[in-house]
Image (spheres, coloured by chain):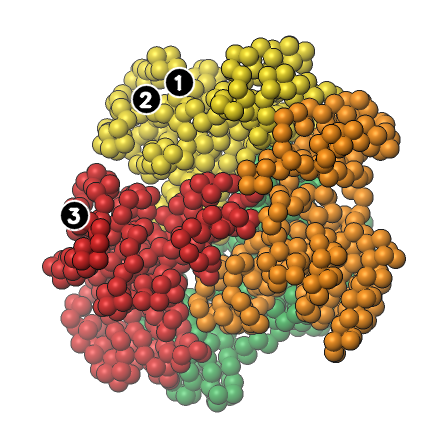
Chain colours: A orange, B yellow, C red, D green
Amino acid sequence: MGIHSVITFRCADGPGIVHAISGAIVAVHGNISDSQQYSSPDTGMFFMRVQVDSDASQDDLAAALAPVQARFDAHLTIDTQGRPARTLVLVSTAPHVLNALLSAQRAGAVPIEVPLVLGNHPDLADMARFYGVGFELVPTPDAPAKAAFEARVREVVREHDIELVVLARYMQIISPQLCADLAGRMINIHHSFLPGFKGANPYRQAHERGVKLIGATAHFVTADLDEGPIIEQSVVRVNHTKSVEELRQLGADAESVTLTHAVRLFAEHRILLDGIRTVIFD
Amino acid sequence: MGIHSVITFRCADGPGIVHAISGAIVAVHGNISDSQQYSSPDTGMFFMRVQVDSDASQDDLAAALAPVQARFDAHLTIDTQGRPARTLVLVSTAPHVLNALLSAQRAGAVPIEVPLVLGNHPDLADMARFYGVGFELVPTPDAPAKAAFEARVREVVREHDIELVVLARYMQIISPQLCADLAGRMINIHHSFLPGFKGANPYRQAHERGVKLIGATAHFVTADLDEGPIIEQSVVRVNHTKSVEELRQLGADAESVTLTHAVRLFAEHRILLDGIRTVIFD
Amino acid sequence: MGIHSVITFRCADGPGIVHAISGAIVAVHGNISDSQQYSSPDTGMFFMRVQVDSDASQDDLAAALAPVQARFDAHLTIDTQGRPARTLVLVSTAPHVLNALLSAQRAGAVPIEVPLVLGNHPDLADMARFYGVGFELVPTPDAPAKAAFEARVREVVREHDIELVVLARYMQIISPQLCADLAGRMINIHHSFLPGFKGANPYRQAHERGVKLIGATAHFVTADLDEGPIIEQSVVRVNHTKSVEELRQLGADAESVTLTHAVRLFAEHRILLDGIRTVIFD
Amino acid sequence: MGIHSVITFRCADGPGIVHAISGAIVAVHGNISDSQQYSSPDTGMFFMRVQVDSDASQDDLAAALAPVQARFDAHLTIDTQGRPARTLVLVSTAPHVLNALLSAQRAGAVPIEVPLVLGNHPDLADMARFYGVGFELVPTPDAPAKAAFEARVREVVREHDIELVVLARYMQIISPQLCADLAGRMINIHHSFLPGFKGANPYRQAHERGVKLIGATAHFVTADLDEGPIIEQSVVRVNHTKSVEELRQLGADAESVTLTHAVRLFAEHRILLDGIRTVIFD
């Protein structure tokens, strides 16, 4: 069967949802190749992700699902499996996360296309060029310049129909308004395991406190700094011999792996929001 | 809704299965609280596990599902969520796995009931008693005694309607006939990460070879020694300073955790067989 | 060589320390079978742990080391390798950590002897008895009773020459005075990965926040609640489907493993204090 | 103190070695900032790695250590801490390991300098150029060409005084003679957890067998294919849904991390050979 679609469906929980969705799929002679669902006891919401193979067009599938969506007042998405998500990457000077993301993209491991990398420092222009990706510099020395940077983000999002904005160690705070406008589609990598050490230098604090594990957290960006819904976390074992610099290096590896993994989950429509939590269908 | 059921369904893949199953659930006014499915590209089989909450009886649910089972020539099970699986545990002298399993059972973490522990050595009688579980000694000094042990296993399976036989470091080879008779419901813990070192003393080999990770594998028992379908595996990091004895101790911890996890998966109907592989709905 | 000793040495860092220590060992014809050292850039302190095999008595070894200790104004300990550390365990009602600790002790994996388990609830008397360990109940319904409990702890420490006090999910806050008196030899298991969620129900918070990893931290007890030097930490991967109760169960496993590991490190003289950090020679 | 040296010392075990080495260090007014040692019960060998800070020259340090080396008939190395190891990288077409290694080098996380990448395919010339590293193509279509490739390896090793040869997914078997000539300084990344599946397509075998963990092993190259001393291993958790291609991708990540870690250990003189095992001072 020629067309491979991925459907996500979110609505208030109740009987008959799965039957209605699968009925719509049967109606277009579709076959379900993968399906996951979850009912949240906390919020009373129902979540589903379905992969469908069918000879019918996606328009036909959408038409079949439309009454189901209406009946359950659902949030529905239909996409082609493996279609690259249009992604804007924001960077400052640290190269490790951008390198991990673009090399994974090139290797076919993360289905994204990156029309542009936007940096407030020129350092990563070379790396973007190596991967054949456009780079644009918008410095942010002061408040008006920061506003200009965000204005440029909005423009790029519009012009390139951007679906996902990735903060790949972009070291500026995003304004509450932009956080709100890009809610649920802007991902940050936090250089700590959350909940974690607050403040500017978590690796120094981790060193001083003598922790035995350090980590990284990928999360959606909200106006509440570092309190957005968590997508993925990972840790690395350390010991007393590690300097602050060595912790930073080990943390950088964790950041690269964790953010790349989170971006793949997003691009494959595997993340659904359940209030301040994420439902991950991996 | 008063009755919580768990359904497993396995058949040749094809369109309409999910719709038919969910239709049967709708017919008894059931609500799906959890559902996972998988279509195997290797074998062309379809696997599903569904948790259903309903006010209808399990007999009504079974009646509604019967035509679906017939239509797809499926293997179907229906059980009450959380019902303890009747489990026979076979042991020799090593206490760690039995202790882990019974303490997890007592803590409510593994839904099993253990009418009997059968040992070919008396060493673990005390431990069984501590947990309020019967213990029976059937020594196995020679071939006839081994046959008698297996005969006793068959009797206990019959008398107590045993659903799962667990080899908790039971140190005798099971006859091919008993392996065949208990196929898919006898679980062993292998004292190595598989594929791994063959032979009697894997920890010595691991030490001599200087491996940096050791592990344990829980698998279904088949006549092909240590080649049965893998259920769960885990590893522990080690280094050159570890003696064979210390590796054995670390391996013992991995065995305890891994087997206990595998037994929980079985008791919760989360393991489905796909040829020589397992599909795990966790 | 008949006598196996373990030496720890802590002093202000400077040239010649290792040479002086090794000279003392050579003087009693000792052989160093294992040695680890660390110089802390943070505190300027030197730390060393040495295992020595010798035919000389431990008194002779001590005599040879005495001038080295004096010269560097060092904190020195000499003990017999593998000698069980006299350990008092404090418990309330949760059985998992006590069970893990005593079964590891019985298996020879943790060199401790436990003359007494002291509980403020009767629940774990049976378990102590099963492992052949004394149990004493001192309820703590009010402030005077809590003071009596701590008074009994002090008595037991004196009478049994206790070296280590383990809080195996003992659910009372220890008074600042007892924390101070047992500084560096009272270990707690914290039911969270630190730094972590504050307050009474971290698993509920972890669930609500949708974290992807939960963990446990073993640390020395100080008057600063949960801020004592960290000995060992571990994490377990979780997802959105886990209820608060399931998180608690997974956390319990992490607690058992982590505390048992920390107690072994202590009993083998592998933990040295470097201000608010630990140096672990594992 | 201006000069930071790292010493490794390997000899038959016996009393007085540490004292003699530390005496030589004291003689040049050196301070030991880090030291690790190990006595192998298997081979009776003694291993030590010491970091020394001193105002004396490395020649003075060598002169002080010379009689100690002679007395114990030891293998001794003295190097400057952090000096980049001259490294030749061999590649074929897979980019992930080379990218991980060179980006870690650029980030300062792995102290190597790479005068040349030698490939039997042209695919990675661009990547080498991006990192400012020379690339040379020597195709290997047949046996004479393979011999020419190895001849070129020998030349480069001589001309550039190469200390370490890294096989970064170089897909040709190395001749026994070259293995022997570069024994202990040629590192390979094996695309499996060892001992593991033999043969050409381990990920297919891992998929067919339904393993729950896959991994990677970095090891020294010996004529015994994949049987050389193990340096580092890592694993990744997988499940039944992963295709052979997805296993390959996850395996690629494990390979990158594991080889990069192994190269750092080598460059920092942290790997000592104990027969067919490695002693790792990390």
Q: Distance from label 1 to label 2 (Cα)?
A: 9 Å
Q: Position of residue D149 (x, y in %)?
A: 75, 58
Could you tell me which secondary element the residue under label 2 belongs to?
Answer: strand
Relative to B34, is A171 on the left or the right?
right
Question: Which residue is labeled 3 in the image?
Answer: C136
Q: Indicate whether B33 appears above or below C276.
A: above
Question: Which residue is labeled 1 in the image?
Answer: B162
Q: Position of residue B138 (x, y in %)?
A: 27, 21
| Closer to us: C206 or C85 | C206
Relative to D191, is B258 on the left or the right?
left
Q: Chain of mark 2?
A: B
**How many other residues sit within 10 Å of disc 1, few (<14), some (14-19) or many (≥20)?**
many
Give, as a three-letter code, the residue at label 2. Answer: Pro
The furthest residue to the left: C159
For the question of whether residue A3 can be seen, the reply is no
Work out which quarter of the rendered image holds the C terminus of chain C and state it. Answer: bottom left
Relative to D218, is A160 on the left or the right?
right
Q: Distance from label 3 to label 1 (Cα)?
A: 40 Å
The first of marks 1 and 2 along the sequence is 2
Give, as a three-letter code, the residue at label 3. Answer: Glu
| Closer to us: B168 or C176 | C176
Which residue is drawn at the image coordinates 38% and 50% (left, top)?
A: C255
Same subunit, tags 1 and 2: yes
